[in-house]
Image (cartoon, rainbow, N blue to C red):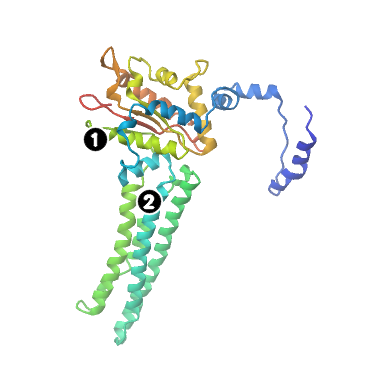
Amino acid sequence: ETISKGEQNWFRNELIKKIPAGRSIILEHWGESAFITFFRESKHIGIRSFFFGSLEFDSSWFKKKFQENFEKVKDKYDAELHSIDKYTQSKIDFILFNSSYINQLAELKKELLDKSNQIESSISEFRDEKMLSTKEKVQRDNYVLYCIEFKKHIGLVFDKIQFIDNCFKTFNEAQLSTFKLQDLNDDFFQYFDKIDYSVFDEKSRATKDASEISYLISDFGDLYNTFFSNYFHNSQKEIHFIADAAKGKTHLSSDIAFKNISNGNPAIFFTGDKFTDETSIIEAIKKCLDINQAFSFDDFLEALDIYGSIIKSKIPIIIDGLNETTFNRLFSPIWKNHLTSFISKVGKIGDTDPLDSFKVDPLFSEQIDPPFSV
């Protein structure tokens, strides 16, 4: 097929500006038949459905579906009243790769900067002490040198925090997985083991001042260790909220969905009663979301994945109140029989190319109270 004048101009004059030295590009022009053949492949189902089918999403679609399903629990939830503790919020931010985690990093940076300034001030006072013997002056100078060397570690810690910050800003989950707290700790002790205040006379002023510097440096390490041990998490594909009645499960699941939608991000929210008298989780979801029967559930998930990759966002599927699902007026076996396989199906989306996929894998499910749990 022929190439238009505008396409020729782009290929000959614009594209060449982007080609690295020593490389070349061959233009392969696709016609309609080539695209049809390409999209017939099963791995391209989601692309075909999103761009060329009726499975097309935007923020208004997610908002409309959320409002339809949120109606049942909205009286139990007040966005201004209900807050989430720091640990739980960090878990949610990680599973959704939510940029709001940057706020917690900012708090850590402030605490570390304050501690770093205390260390700097104490070192200066220790170094500037007057009326010293020659022996003590040499000892102090050597001690100060090791303390100043520790500032390299301080710089490394702030670099790593900035690295994590950038990963969340650029939605680079694969890069984030390379961060290891142990690497920071190994670097810490490389410097800290050399800072030894026992070289001073035990009852001297120098021992007291030097030990205070050592304790401040130790506190610096404790600050980031406490943070990363508690608020930095491994990647996971689902969260299950398990608790007795009236412990805040609905508030928590509602808060996740409500804030996502309010911030213009996608979320899919269901209440357990939507699955009453249903025998298939998948068919119930398709019914609730008015998914055309011409599309399979895999078509739907793949299309969601494409949408997530376009807007750089994960899409949580939240099911609240599994204990409210009944079948013939008895507790429904649908969760016991099918929840595990449903989670597995959702979690596999995008696995063919995990570095490029944004996935629909975060699935929040409020588990029911005893005697049954998954």
Residue type marked 2: Gln
SS class of the residue under badge 2? helix
Q: Which mark is residue 104?
A: 2
On-image quarter of the N terminus: top right
Crowd around label 2: few <14 · some 14–19 · many ≥20 (10 Å): some
What residue is disc 1 on?
Answer: 247
Q: Position of residue 164 (x, y in %)?
A: 44, 50
Q: Position of residue 91 (x, y in %)?
A: 35, 42
SS class of the residue under badge 1? loop
Between 208 and 65, the one lying in front of the other is: 65
Residue type marked 1: Lys
- Residue 80 visible: yes
Q: Position of residue 125 (x, y in %)?
A: 33, 77
Q: Residue at x 36, y 52 (%)?
A: 182
Query: Is 110 above or below relative to 356?
Result: below
Q: Residue at x 30, y 20 (%)?
A: 325
